[in-house]
Amino acid sequence: MKQNEDKSGDVVTGCIFFLLAMQSSEVDVDLKDHSNLILDVLTPPEDYQFALPLAFAVEEINRNLYLLPNVSLIFIFLTELPHDKQALQKFIYITTKRERPLLNYNCEYKPQCRVMITGPMLAQSMSLAHFFALYKYPQLTYGPFHPILSDREQFPNLYQMAPKDTALALAMVSLMLHFNWNWVGLAISDDDQGLQFLLDLRGENEVQRVCLAFVIVIPVNMELYMSRAEVCNNQIETSSTNVVIIYGDTDSTLAVCFRMWVSQGIQRIWVTTSQWDVITSKIDFTVDSFHGILAFAHHHAEISGFKNFVQTLNSAKYTDLFLAQLGWMYFSCKAFTSNCNTLENCSLNFSLEWLMLQSFDMTFSDDAYDIYNAVYAMAHALHEMLLQQVENQRMNTLRELHSDCSQLHLFLKNMHFVNPVGDVINMNQKEKLQAEYGIYHICNFPHGVGFKVTIGEFKPYCPHGHQLHLYEDVIEWATGSRQHLSAFPQMPSAVCSVACPPGFRKIRQEGMAACCFDCTPCPANEISNETDMDQCMKCPEDQYANAEQNYCLYKDVTFLTFDDTLGMTLSSMALCLSAFTLLVLGIFVKHKDTPIVKANNLTLSYILLISLIFCFLSSLLFIGHPNSVTCIMQQITYGILFTVAVSTVLAKTITVVLAFKVTTPGKRMKWFLLSGAPTYIIPICIIIQIILCAIWLGTSPPSVDIDAHSEHGHIIIVCNKGSVTAFYSVLGYLGSLALGSFTVAFLARNLPDTFNEAKFLTFSMLLFCSVWVTFLPVYHSTKGKVMVAVEVFSILASSAGLLGCIFFPKCYIILLRPERNSLQSLRDKTFSRTHIS
């Protein structure tokens, strides 16, 4: 690991300062010279990032006429601070002997109160807090917020400057979702802070659907880690994800691992916090990828004048070249892009001198900003305490003011103020607010130059969906792409499974994370109109799924109408056949005195023709928009009219048989024929059918039925038969009448009577029965308006069969062979039959 050391990539080390307030009469050195002495001689270069913001804040306060008037702040910066307890006690003893006491209480000096500023490491702040608590040292810490340091029982004198990071996990997950990253890795330190972050992240992931590809918990002990190093490295190298979250202290074993992963050339997008915003390596930036660090830093206003302050301390030393190496450069995007529209057109042979030609400002990091606020917190608390001392002095009494730590705590623990940049700072640890975050993209350029661009911000107090705001134009410029963020060709993917498009749903892979799934099409008549849907949605009854199954279409309402071809054809047939039947009736009325018309009971013929006319017209009730009335009228009218027609045929058949029996010698059945007994068959049969229909209507009458499932994309409005038993009873009764007529007619087919129509009646009943026997299976195998059309066609066909078989031969003789419709022809025909026999 030491072979990969990179000075520009060294992790951050801790820094400790002591602040002391002195009245102007006590200051025996020039404050400017004092700062220069400490910064130039006593401060190691790697600690300038902490020392310079401290000196800047002290300088501002000392120049402020309204804050601590007639009182100046000075600071002491200790080098080579010991880490163990015995060495620390020895160090304090030596400094006291040199008349530079660190402790707030010393017998040889009047009571004073120094404030200690420590950070950013947790372990260092905790160890110093336990030791200096014996002397009631006010301790202000910079660096990440640690909940353990807020325990007032363990650390009664410690105050954290950083805001809480309770929204950090939510902020990171929101960024992942914006870039469609749902498969990310996590590396944390094996401590309370790291494990708490893991719980927070998993809690947000359950809600937001982001999964962890792996979780690497790095032990604090280096030796323990070395025994697991190979496994940890393999997890990152072999994982399919391109995004890894890093969370932990920069002085931990995790920091060593991170530097090693980067030095090995593992290209990932490292999502982390602001303390990790260091130049990780000298590997040149490549414009065909979007890698580097995405850092979340606490959002705060810019502090102006810092660059000028540093350069005036020692202009020869603090040049732009030195400042560029010291901290991050914030380039003016406008000036930069004027020379280079996109990074794709830029040469990678950048030089630091060329970069210095661009305009930039020094900007405080989170740690530096916390130090800045710590100095102001101490100043405001001391100011309030001194004001109270002045108010409590008696008139005309002059007494030196002193700062007693026991009193300073009373003011410091409840202090809240507005710093010079306008941010509200609250020292009450219980009232710490959630932080707002700025999001930065950090990448490396040649010569060890890091380039840091603000790409967005996260505000936890905004409504859900409006918390994350990214500057798409900045990302477009930084990546050289003008496409939408989620479609960058340079943007690495971080998904376990490709998103399921609309029309598909996710199927979880057994034993895998929730983000790993297969896609399967939605079932029939179900849709998914968004990506990555767990379940498909059924379309409402009046809608159906389109071919892509991503939205529902309204179904067409359909029924057998007079407008479509099928309905128009059937209605035309019904009208033509009824008109033809009416014509036949007219022929029979006109030729009622002819033998062929009078031969088979003229009255029954009239009844049959009239009933057939209404049978043809009744089929029109099945066409058109169904309603409750038409549904009832369809079945009842059809049942009664056909009963009249079939019972009439039965009566005609019986009349033929009786006529033959009467004319046979020795038979005495003439009174049956003369009394009109066959005619009574018709009302008897009708009464029976009416009773069946009444029972049907009383139990379960026909009604309107909406069928939304039989035909895809259509809602069929049909008439429900109601009681199926009653329907088949009516139909069976008609069948029994027809079968009875067929049987009688078949037995009387060869009777040698002139104008005998028994054969015609036989054929008519055979055709009638054939039609309705065929109707039953065809009716049950069809749906919708075709089913209605089958019923209409059966009515027309059976009625037309009766009309054609019974009346067509007679009309043929009446109209085309009138010579056969006479008594002479009847005698000749009878004579020829007698002669032949």
Image (tube, grey):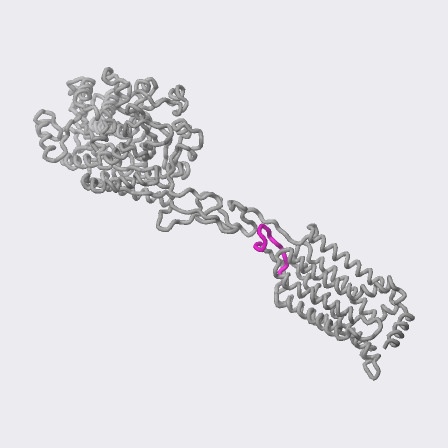
Residue drawn at (84%, 71%) of the image: 755
Q: Position of residue 464 (x, y in %)?
A: 40, 39
Q: Is residue 787 above or below residue 43?
A: below
Name the foreground residue: 650 vs 239: 239
Residue 315 in which image quadrant = top left
- Is 344 inside the magenta-drawn segment? no
The reply, left or right, for residue 286 in relation to residue 254 is right
Q: Residue furthest front?
A: 836
Name the foreground residue: 68 vs 718: 718
Over which residues does the magenta segment extend?
708-720
Q: Position of residue 792 (x, y in %)?
A: 69, 59
Q: Is residue 510 above or below residue 221?
A: below
Residue drawn at (26%, 32%) of the image: 263
Task: Locate the N terminus by quadrant.
Answer: top left
- Is 719 inside the magenta-drawn segment? yes
Q: Residue furthest right?
A: 824
Task: Locate the C terminus by quadrant.
Answer: bottom right
Q: Is residue 528 above or below residue 47?
A: below
Residue 213 in which image quadrant = top left
Residue 202, can we see it? yes
Residue 29 in which image quadrant = top left
Residue 384, can we see it? no
The reply, left or right, for residue 290 in relation to residue 250 is right
The reply, left or right, for residue 725 in relation to residue 654 is left
